[in-house]
Amino acid sequence: MATPKQRSHSGEGHLVSNIVIFVLMMVLFLGAIVAFGFEPQIGAIPAFAIGLTLFALAFFIPQQIIGRSDSHKDLAS
C-alpha cells in the first residue's frame, strides 16, 4: 500500500490559492493606504473609517478566518 507524501508545512501544495489570497489581502492593504490619502477630498472621518476598515480586513481575514490548518488538538496524546 502506497503511503502519501508527508507535507512539511500546512500550505504546501496550494501555490495558486496561496498566491490568490496574498494578492487579495495586498489589494485590501494598499486600498487602506490609498483611502487614508483621500482625506482632503472626502474628509478626515470617512477616509479614516474606510482605511481602518480595509486594514482590519486585510489583517484579520488571514489571521482569524483563514487561520492555521494545524490548530486542532493533537489526538495522539
Image (cartoon, rainbow, N blue to C red):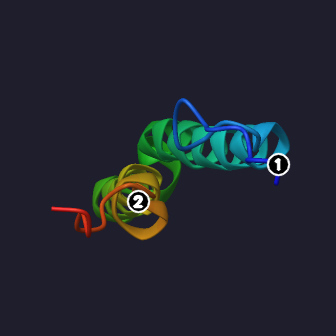
| For residue 33, above or below residue 52 | above
Image x and y of residue 40, in percent? 44, 43
Q: Nearer the viewer, residue 50 or 25?
A: 25
- What residue is shown with label 1? 2
Image point (66%, 36%), residue name: 12
Q: Quadrant of residue 49?
A: bottom left
Q: Earlier in the sequence, mark 1 or mark 2?
A: 1
Image point (33%, 55%), residue name: 52
Of circles 1 and 2, the one toward us is 1
Q: Secondary structure at mark 1?
A: loop
- What residue is shown with label 2? 67
Q: Quadrant of residue 47?
A: bottom left
Q: Nearer the viewer, residue 36 or 15?
A: 15
Kind of residue at badge 2: Gly
| For residue 72, above or below residue 4 | below
Image x and y of residue 60, in percent? 35, 59
Give the quadrant of the C terminus: bottom left
Image point (34%, 64%), residue name: 64
Q: Would residue 67 appear left or right of 10 to someone viewing this image?
A: left
Image x and y of residue 8, in percent? 54, 29
